[in-house]
Image (cartoon, rainbow, N blue to C red):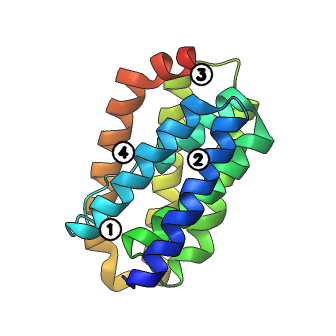
Amino acid sequence: MFPKLDAYILIIGLVVLAVLALTNLLAIALLLAVAFILSFFIQRFGLRMIGIELVTFVSVVAGFVYGPFVGIAIALVLIIFHLLVSGYFGIYFAWVIPEYPIAAYIASTMSSQSIVSVGILIVIGLNVINILLTAVAYRQNIGKYLLYAVTNVLLNVILFMAAGQIVVDIL
């Protein structure tokens, strides 16, 4: 990653966190901070091939709790930050960037359901779509992506089952 770009991204991330903290969204701001830090670790330690990320969890929870506008805004900022900091570049942006705001919107329409079932449904849906699009656009990378998708589903299912309702109750 480029040191100057890292600094700009960090500053933008801190500004977003400050705005959220000032608008009584401190708890979601803390989740964003953890997600931002994890994105730096993914890039720093070369963990891109394992499905470790908090973008899905935070986007779905934000849409579920705060509704479509805030959920979409948080998801958009978070996925762009995650992709840039983690070093994901390429045509992948074309479908991944819109997916997470859409996921937040879908979660906002399902707020009468359990966050656990909504989260798991969205995680599986995102990964199925990504597998299909990766097979079409990056056929040569499908094997690597399958490892990412399987670990991503497992980690997110565990996260939604263990912490989903707790986080929703806090927010």
Per the image, the residue denoted by label 3 is 171
Residue where numbered disc 1 is placed? 145
For residue 80, above or below residue 19: below
Q: Nearer the viewer, residue 55 or 170?
A: 170
Q: Is residue 12 above or below residue 134?
A: above
Q: How many marks?
A: 4
Q: Earlier in the sequence, mark 1 or mark 2?
A: 2
Of mark 1 and mark 3, the one earlier in the sequence is: 1
Residue 17 has which mark?
2
Q: Quadrant of residue 156?
A: top left
Q: Is residue 35 above or below residue 11?
A: above
Q: Residue at x 43, y 48 (%)?
A: 35
Label 4 sits on residue: 153
**Which comes sooner in the sequence, label 4 or label 2?**
2
Q: Residues within 10 Å of mark 4 (few under 14, many from 20)?
A: many
Asked if the residue under mark 2 is in contact with the one under mark 1, i.e. CB atoms within 8 Å, the reply is no
The numbered mark, 1 or 4, whose residue comes first in the sequence reads 1
Is there any visible trace of residue 147 in the rendered image?
yes
Q: Amino acid at mark 3?
A: Leu
For the residue carrying disc 3, how many other residues have a C-alpha within 10 Å: few (<14), some (14-19), or many (20+)? some
**Considering depth in this image, is 30 or 67 the residue closer to the camera?**
30
Task: Name which of mark 4 and mark 3 comes first in the sequence.
Answer: 4
Write the residue at 52% across / 33% down: 119
Q: Position of residue 91 (x, y in %)?
A: 54, 83
Q: Is residue 138 visible?
A: no
Dividing the image into 4 quarters, which one contains the C terminus? top right
Q: CA distance from mark 1 to mark 4?
A: 12 Å
Q: Secondary structure at mark 2?
A: helix
